[in-house]
Amino acid sequence: MTMKHLFSATLIALAALGATAAGAHEFKQRDIRIVHPYAVPSLAGVPNGMAFVDLQNQGRAGDRLVRLSSPAAAGVEVHEMKTEAGVMKMRPLDGLALAPGRTVKMADSGLHLMLVGLKAPLKTGDKVPVTLVFEKSGETTVDFWVQDRATGDAAMHRHHDHKH
């Protein structure tokens, strides 16, 4: 192999590795597919942060997200925002049901994760580990990338439009 071919092969391998790393923002825990977990930068002086993720139950039985935690916050909760009588209200939920064959899209539905009592502000480019515990599928820890909400939503939509 000539030096030119070796150099070309190395560039191709590095490009493939980069593409794999960029596309690796999806995780699987048994029947649950965890798609594009991201958090948004926190506001100055605000002790809480928001995060979003799509959870797809690819199994034949229902499952439930029962607990969340992160070393970056005192607690992590599932929250729902709804407008009632013209007033926007936010409330914590006791877990999150995941019906078989269905996807819960947090960014589109008024659902989000609330990182309560942040130990440090969330800044663009950070990665925040969050542990998700499912009733049937068990426990997994994934990195939530901190990025602008518009960027996160756009990336999420691009991912959903991509055919596998």
Image: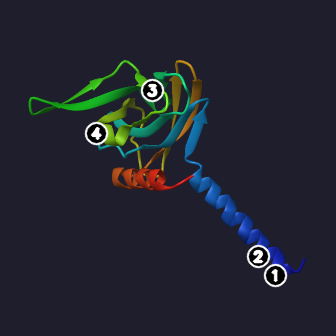
Neighbourhood count class around disc 3 (C-alpha, 10 Å): few under 14, some 14–19, many 20 upward: many
Give the labeled residue for mark 2. Answer: 8
Give the labeled residue for mark 1. Answer: 4
Q: Quadrant of residue 79?
A: top left
Question: In the visual, does 36 lie left or right of 151?
Answer: right
Neighbourhood count class around disc 1 (C-alpha, 10 Å): few under 14, some 14–19, many 20 upward: few
Q: Position of residue 60 (x, y in %)?
A: 55, 26
Q: Position of residue 119 (x, y in %)?
A: 42, 33
Q: Position of residue 148 (x, y in %)?
A: 37, 52
Residues at marks 2 and 1 touching, judged by CB atoms closer than 8 Å = yes
At x 59%, y 49%, the residue is 24
Q: CA distance from mark 3 to mark 4?
A: 34 Å
Tell me which label, 1 or 4, sits earlier in the chain.
Answer: 1
Q: Amino acid at mark 1?
A: Lys
Q: Nearer the viewer, mark 3 or mark 1?
A: 3
Secondary element under disc 2, as helix, strand or loop, is helix
Tell me which label, 3 or 1, sits earlier in the chain.
Answer: 1
Give the labeled residue for mark 4. Answer: 45
Secondary element under disc 1, as helix, strand or loop, is helix
Give the labeled residue for mark 3. Answer: 98
Q: Nearer the viewer, mark 1 or mark 4?
A: 1
Q: CA distance from mark 2 to mark 1?
A: 6 Å
Q: Position of residue 32 (x, y in %)?
A: 55, 32
Question: In the visual, does 4 lie left or right of 76?
Answer: right
Q: Amino acid at mark 3?
A: Leu
Secondary element under disc 3, as helix, strand or loop, is strand
At x 49%, y 29%, the residue is 70
Q: Nearer the viewer, mark 3 or mark 4?
A: 3
Q: CA distance from mark 2 to mark 3?
A: 46 Å
Q: Residue furthest right?
A: 1
Tell me which label, 3 or 4, sits earlier in the chain.
Answer: 4
Q: Amino acid at mark 4?
A: Gly
